[in-house]
Amino acid sequence: MDIQVKICGLRTPEDVAVVAEAGARYAGFVFFPKSPRAVSVAEARALALSAPVGLAKVALVVDADDALLDEIVDEVPLDMLQLHGHESPERVAQIRARHGLPVMKAVGVASEVDLPALEAYGKVADQLLVDAKAPKDSVLPGGNGLAFDWRLIAGRRWPVPWMLAGGLTPENVAEAVRLTGARQIDVSSGVERARGEKSPELIRAFVRAAQTAGAGAESAVPRF
Ligand SMILES: O=C(O)c1ccccc1NCC(=O)[C@H](O)[C@H](O)COP(=O)(O)O
């Protein structure tokens, strides 16, 4: 089973190069001013232009208005928009129609009651990001390095591709893949040496661990 990895919160051309060399599929740029990983539109443009072919560029926004989205989409060569705020299903559909880019909607999960939202967003988004719900007092709606109970989604499937996120690390990603059956994995805090600062060693270790977990899962499937 091929596991696709997204590394989120890249801020330097070196981050982008390491992520690509390590074999990740997606690179995420955060447009949320309060984040230690925030980049400006101009910075994101330079980062996206430095990305090699095959590395998909994702813009992460939080309840962005049309003006900001227009600016980002006009300036930054992108492959996907990640909506990480309280965007309603109607707003997701509107953004998708307006910008002509695939849209991934992040949904925070802490308990069973959060799961129906995944069904609702699965009808309007191109992908889902199944993430840990941010604590109420958190400044950041995501990227807090917190995991949720993966057993909540074990065996569940949605009508669109989805990524697992929240508190993943090189050490726990194999168990997360085993429990959830995720084929796409997203990480930010777990590959940082300091808040907002990516570690090349941790990025490489994470991608290796995720891909090894995927290969293990494949070999468990009987071949006839
Ligand atoms: O990373 C941020 O600073 C951030 C800010 C605002 C909204 C979302 C943000 N991050 C989301 C992510 O990086 C990931 O998609 C995901 O939540 C995993 O984060 P982590 O638990 O840190 O691995």
Image: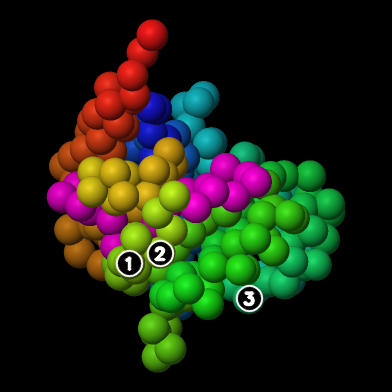
Nearer to the camera, 69 or 114:
114
| Mark 2 CB lies closer than 8 A to ligand 1 | no
Q: Which residues are magenta?
A: 156-172
Q: CA distance from mark 2 to mark 1?
A: 6 Å
Nearer to the camera, 179 or 126:
179
Mark 2 touching mark 1, by CB under 8 A? yes
Q: CA distance from mark 2 to mark 3?
A: 22 Å
Nearer to the camera, 203 or 214:
214
Dot in front, 3 or 1:
1
Residue 163 point in image, percent of width and height: 47, 49
Whether 54 is drawn above or below 179: the answer is: above
Q: Does residue 16 appear left or right of residue 198 in this picture?
A: right
The circle on residue 149 is 1
Q: Residues within 10 Å of mark 1 (few under 14, many from 20)?
A: few
Whether 85 is drawn above or below 171: the answer is: below
Residue 215 point in image, percent of width and height: 28, 26
Q: Which residue has dot 2 on it?
A: 152
The residue located at (20%, 64%) in the rendering is 194
